[in-house]
Image: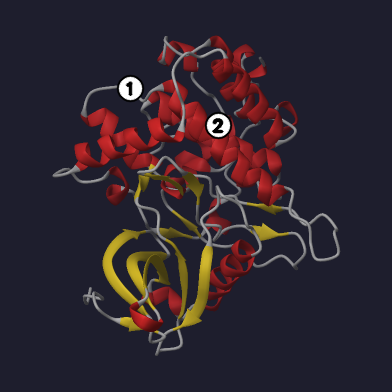
Amino acid sequence: MESQIGKRLAGKYELGDLAGEGGMARVYQGITHGAAGFRRPVAVKRLLEPLSDNPEFVAMFVEEARVVSELQHPNIVQIHDFDQDDRGAYFLVMEWIDGLNLLDWCHAYSLRKEKTPWHLMMAVGIEVLKALGAAHDRKDARGAEAPIYHRDVTPQNILMSVTGNVKLSDFGLARAMDRARMTQPQMVKGKLSYLAPELTRGEDPTVQSDLFGVGIVMWEGLVGEKLFRGDTPLEILQSIQAANVPSLSEKREDVPAELHTIVHKALSADPADRYRSTSGMVRDLANVLRVTPESTSAAVIGSSVREAVAALKGNEPASSSEETEVLDFGELRPVATEPPAPPSESKKA
């Protein structure tokens, strides 16, 4: 790949080091140049070159810019600009988050042979739920309900800053209900394992499908293991549809029983058994934290991020090893050969 360092887009956005790469796009650390020597750190997101000529992926990218530009919330990564380079390819300019993603934060604990602090995982979960709640509660210019469902809640899309802020990024798979449905997108291998069971059967995204994603992220972050596994995409989808979730309490004996109940409720196989809204899950998590002596302040989270960054120096981040093969999700959807297994008593709790 040709180095992009020093290249300027639209005459003002200077590209720096590659900050991250997925199956559809690369994100660069960048600098905005303005009048009188003005400089500001930003993140610049560009579609991979083979995909920048694909109308479907371009449409998804344009949709991401449109969707996120309408969401102003402290827990959502904000978009500063959307423009085209000298080839006519679109790029996004977003706020730069100085820190790391949740996957790498968790990986830093594993390198130290430690478990993630459960109270901090709860605090991160609350911030992510606030971001989703803002998207779910979106209204259009006329005041009518126009919810946006993220559909891609993964550890890589949860960013944690050295000052303790938690932000949700990458609404590239989001769908706004005020537009005609776009063609079913292809999926990136590695993201499959964060889908809700109903999405693998072709059902529409909902509040509950996003909450299932939060449940997966919290379970994995607490346990330190993948929840839904498989050697092939087909096996992963079958695992999701079976929705057999090992007991959190058995995997982490130190977590409060209330946290076990909350996570397993979010991971219920039947969407009707999950929380009705993000606020309900936030309320239950907050109630547990109120009686927890450990601090979950931004200062404490920020300190843990700085420690994680130091622990990762000289080690390959976990996010760099995630699979990024683009798959045709439409061909993978009809995989269920038997009804999903009924939820266990712990998941009904």
Total numbered labels: 2
On screen, residue 333 versus residue 166, left or right, reads: right
Q: Nearer the viewer, residue 101 or 58?
A: 101
Check disc 1 and report the residue beneath it.
115
Q: Quadrant of residue 62?
A: bottom right
Across and down, in percent, residue 325 comes to 38, 58
Mark 2 secondary-structure assignment: helix
Q: Identify whether 32 is placed above or below 251.
A: below
Q: Identify whether 149 is placed above or below 342.
A: below
Using a 10 Å C-alpha cutoff, classify the residue at mark 1 as few (fewer than 14 neighbours), some (14 to 19) or many (20 or more). some
Q: Earlier in the sequence, mark 2 or mark 1?
A: 1
Q: Identify whether 63 is placed above or below 228.
A: below
Q: Quadrant of residue 277?
A: top right
Using a 10 Å C-alpha cutoff, classify the residue at mark 2 as few (fewer than 14 neighbours), some (14 to 19) or many (20 or more). many
On screen, residue 236 versus residue 38, left or right, reads: right
Identity of the residue drawn at 36% across and 27% down: 224
Across and down, in percent, residue 157 comes to 46, 49
Q: Is residue 39 visible?
A: yes
Q: Is residue 268 visible?
A: no
Marks 2 and 1, how far apart in space? Answer: 18 Å
Q: Residue furthest left?
A: 314
Mark 2: amino acid? Gly
Identity of the residue drawn at 21% across and 27% down: 112
Check disc 2 and report the residue beneath it.
215
Mark 1 secondary-structure assignment: loop
Q: How is the image coloured?
A: secondary structure
Identity of the residue drawn at 86% across and 64% down: 142
Mark 1: amino acid? Lys
